[in-house]
Image: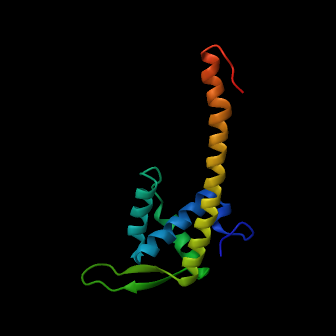
Amino acid sequence: MCDEKTNCCCHHPGTGLIQLEILRILYESPTHGYQIMEGLRKFTMNEYAPEPGAIYTMLRRLEQKGLVTSRWEKRVSRLDRRVYTITKEGEEFLRGGLRVIKKRRELMDDLVRFHEDNFEKRVTSKRKGTVNR
């Protein structure tokens, strides 16, 4: 399970978020690597174009941890492809990771409110000739 005390993907923000997004994609439906890469591009609004090697390495690691399984899908007159499916352990890991992200978002929201209340209003007031604290 992914929580603040375990060494989970959430402790490595870039990679951790990508792993959670892969698990989310697989939670919605079993799929193959290319569709996962397309889902990641969509998730990052085309800011991150994953290298296939990096994604397949992550998928293998997720499989070694028991978070996903894979099987070969036979296709007529086309190359076979590996289809990935999230496991129950993967669902639990995803659920725990999302709980951690939710807690962190609440902390971030609190920090943003503090910044707005204490610094943005102060700058606006300075421009008008007064300083509010």
x, y percent for residue 25: 44, 69
User: Relative to the observer, which residue lies in front, 21 or 4?
Assistant: 4
x, y percent for residue 67: 56, 79
x, y percent for residue 18: 54, 62
In the displayed image of the protein, which residue is found farthest to the right?
Answer: 5
User: Relative to the observer, which residue lies in front, 100 or 55?
Assistant: 100
Quadrant including the N terminus: bottom right
Q: Is residue 3 above or below residue 105?
A: below
| Residue in the picture at 54% in, 77% down | 91
| Residue in the picture at 55% in, 70% down | 58
- Figure quadrant of residue 65: bottom right
Give the number of callouts: 0
| Residue in the picture at 46% in, 65% down | 52
- Figure quadrant of residue 43: bottom left
- Horizontally, residue 14 falls left or right of residue 33, namely right
Here the colouring is rainbow
Quadrant including the C terminus: top right
In the displayed image of the protein, which residue is found farthest to the top?
Answer: 129
In the displayed image of the protein, which residue is found farthest to the left?
Answer: 77
User: Relative to the observer, which residue lies in front, 85 or 60?
Assistant: 85
User: Relative to the observer, which residue lies in front, 35 or 89?
Assistant: 89
- Horizontally, residue 32 falls left or right of residue 66, namely left
Q: Is residue 12 above or below residue 111?
A: below
Q: Is residue 32 above or below residue 87?
A: above
x, y percent for residue 33: 42, 71
| Residue in the picture at 40% in, 57% down | 42
